[in-house]
Amino acid sequence: MSSPVVTQTRKRFHELRVFLSAVMFYTRIPVKYELVDEDGLLQKATRYLPLIGLMVGAVSALGFYLVSFVAPAGIAAVVAMTLAVLMTGAFHEDGFVDTCDGFGGGWTVEQTLSIMKDSRIGTYGGIGLFLSLLLRFLLIAEIAHAGTAMTAATAIVLSHSLGRLVPVYVIAASSYVRLDETSKVKPVAKGVSVVSVGIATIVAAAIVFGLTGLWTVAFAAPAAALVLALMCRVWFHRHIGGYTGDTLGAAEQIGELAVLAVLVVLPQVLHLTWL
């Protein structure tokens, strides 16, 4: 019979393995750890998506902040976006592109899923990616213009952290539809536990509070992410009856853009001034 100390140590070590699995699966950060999906590690790894967003967002925001000292906000925004893509290997952007192609060109569920599985970028995917990157660039630059470089850097971190909470909620509220076993996200897509949803929500709320110092915003942000996730769920179900790994990537990208858009529009609507 294991002692309480040994049991607690094992739990902490297991949680560390879950986190390292999340880092290896969702980023290109080099980790000296062999990724083996045992004990449902990848499935549990979704609980740390907001924390992964904090890591990616922090590097991206730091790049923006440093470049803003020697170049206009637009150039700093491009650097920030590039750093984020390099850290993730365009993991979520790839899913967004495939979703645009599939939903734009597919007439049936089978045809849509087939198009989404094609690695080539089609017209809808190309246009969608261009508009997504353009909108992200404009939103970051506008936030910097309305506030300061630090304001924009904070917004970048918030967008990456909260944006990654959206796919967690999508998994919890929907079901996986791709039937083959070859999908790289199959272990992740099997579902998400209540514990993982709770941890992801708490982590996201803590990040928001740490960056803003406002409890009201910390509570409201996950609620807004949930509403957006439910809207994504309706959209996904209308086209394919559930979600795939690609649509989870699309949900994350939509979440990022939504956070940035809110940070641009809300101050104007409420007549607030960025500090």
Image: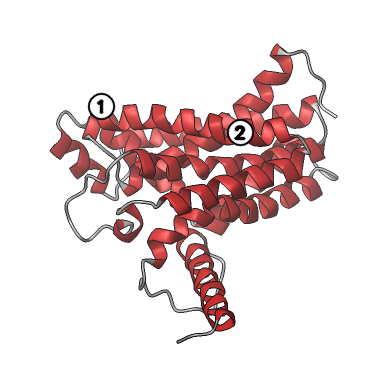
Q: Is residue 47 above or below residue 267?
A: below
Horizontally, residue 48 falls left or right of residue 114, namely right
Horizontally, residue 47 falls left or right of residue 125, namely right
Going 16% across and 35% down the picture, which residue do you hit? 109
Foreground residue among 195 and 204: 195
Percent x, y of residue 201: 55, 45
User: What amino acid does circle 2 point to?
Assistant: Ala
User: What amino acid does circle 1 point to?
Assistant: Arg
Percent x, y of residue 157: 67, 45
Determine the CA span between mark 1 and mark 2: 26 Å
Horizontally, residue 188 falls left or right of residue 148, namely left
Could you say whether the residue bearing mark 2 is in a helix, strand or loop? helix
Q: Is residue 212 above or below residue 82?
A: above
Foreground residue among 17 and 139: 17
Q: Is residue 273 above or below residue 123?
A: above
Foreground residue among 231 and 62: 231
The reply to whether discs 1 and 2 touch (Cβ–Cβ < 8 Å) is: no
Q: Is residue 78 above or below residue 17?
A: above
Going 61% across and 50% down the picture, which residue do you hit? 203
Say which mark, if any, is on residue 238: 1
Could you say whether the residue bearing mark 1 is in a helix, strand or loop? helix
Residue 137 can be seen, yes or no: no
Q: Which residue is denoted by mark 2 in the rendering?
A: 221
**Number of residues whose C-alpha sits closer than 10 Å to that of mark 1, classed few (under 14), some (14–19) or many (20 or more):** few
Residue 50 can be seen, yes or no: yes
Going 49% across and 73% down the picture, which residue do you hit? 14
Number of the front mark, 1 or 2: 2
Foreground residue among 237 and 63: 237
